[in-house]
Amino acid sequence: MTVQQVAVIPFQKNPALQVLLIRNSRTAAGCPKGGIADHGNDLREAARLECLEEAGADGRLGLDFVGEFSYWRADRNTMCASS
């Protein structure tokens, strides 16, 4: 089974660049927030809503696409595809 995931990298320039990272509870590393694209919307809107739900951050989405990757979640026996 493949699960489509989405993420955003929230930032602001005020005047210096500030990037919002959420601490991962398992590894304590900072990472962008995202999740499963289960909102029934397009991927951009799903990514915006994930960030709002998980981090309480909302804003305008830029047009830049950073990348995509796939990885295996052995603990869930699932292939994850992130955009």
Image (cartoon, rainbow, N blue to C red):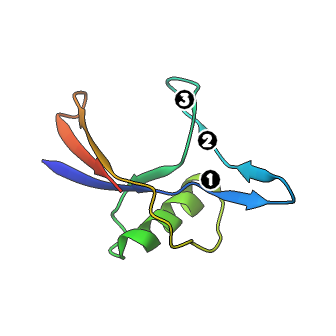
Compute the Cα span from label 1 to label 3: 14 Å
- In this view of the protein, which residue sits in the foreground, 38 or 48? 48
Where on the picture, by quarter, is residue 28? Answer: top right
- In this view of the protein, which residue sits in the foreground, 46 or 68? 68
For the C terminus, the quadrant is bottom left
| Residue matched to label 1 | 55
Helix, strand or loop status at disc 1: helix
Residue 41 image point, x, y percent: 36, 76
Compute the Cα span from label 3 to label 2: 9 Å
Q: Which is more N-terminal, label 3 or label 1?
A: 3
Q: Residue at x 45, y 73 (%)?
A: 45
| Residue matched to label 2 | 22
Compute the Cα span from label 2 to label 1: 7 Å
| Residue matched to label 3 | 25
Q: Residue at x 22, y 28 (%)?
A: 74
Labels 3 & 2 near each other (Cβ < 8 A): no
